[in-house]
Image (cartoon, rainbow, N blue to C red):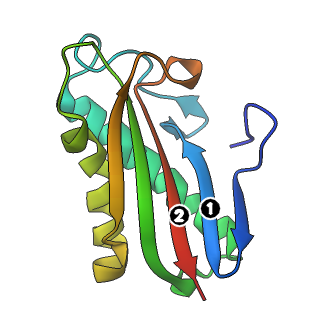
Amino acid sequence: ATPAANYVPYTMENHTLYISGQVPFWNGKLLHIGKVGDDYSIEDAVLAARVCGLNIIAQAKAALAGDLDRVRRIVKVGGFVNCTADFNQHPSVINGASDLFVEVFGNAGKHARFAVGANSLPMGVAVEVDAVIAID
């Protein structure tokens, strides 16, 4: 998808690919708008994080001219959860993306990570995920 502001979807420097935050945008539609703990269950939010992960992979594929074999490792993942003040299961939500990366890239998909709660996210989405990827 086209960025919503003044940034690019990815940059590459010194064998490192930086993927901008991806939201649950799928088939031309923004999914999961609202708060986890109010509007969405953990299961819904895990699915939203997985869609964000799929979008990260799509951006990596675009950056690498379709050659995902150039991915050496998913180095770091950042996960943001738009949630109620009492919600505390952020890591479980971001597992939706983390598990996907291991499914797709095996051991190279294992990564360092943070998962935090937020009062709001761009366009009101429930989840946003970014990634740093080592490449050949």
* Nearest to the observer: residue 11 or residue 64: 11
Distance CA(mark 2)–CA(mark 1): 5 Å
- Relative horizontal placement of residue 15, taking residue 90 as reference (left or right): right
Quarter of the rendering containing residue 108: bottom left
Q: Is residue 25 above or below residue 12?
A: above
Quarter of the rendering containing residue 22: top right
Dot 1 amino acid type? Tyr
Q: Secondary structure at mark 2?
A: strand
Say the numbered circle drawn on residue 59. Answer: none
- Mark 2, Cα crowd under 10 Å, few <14 / some 14-19 / many 20+, is many
Q: Is residue 86 above or below residue 105?
A: above
- Relative horizontal placement of residue 10, taking residue 78 as reference (left or right): right
Residue name at image x 47 percent, y 17 percent: 120
Give residue 96's position: percent from left, percent from top.
28, 49
Dot 2 amino acid type? Val
Give residue 55's position: percent from left, percent from top.
53, 52
Residue name at image x 20 percent, y 23 percent: 41
Give residue 129's position: percent from left, percent from top.
46, 45
The residue at the far right in this view is 6
Q: Secondary structure at mark 1?
A: strand
The residue tagged 1 is 18
* Nearest to the observer: residue 91 or residue 46: 91
Total count of labels:
2
Quadrant of the image containing the N terminus: top right
The residue tagged 2 is 132
Quadrant of the image containing the C terminus: bottom right
The reply to whether discs 2 and 1 touch (Cβ–Cβ < 8 Å) is yes
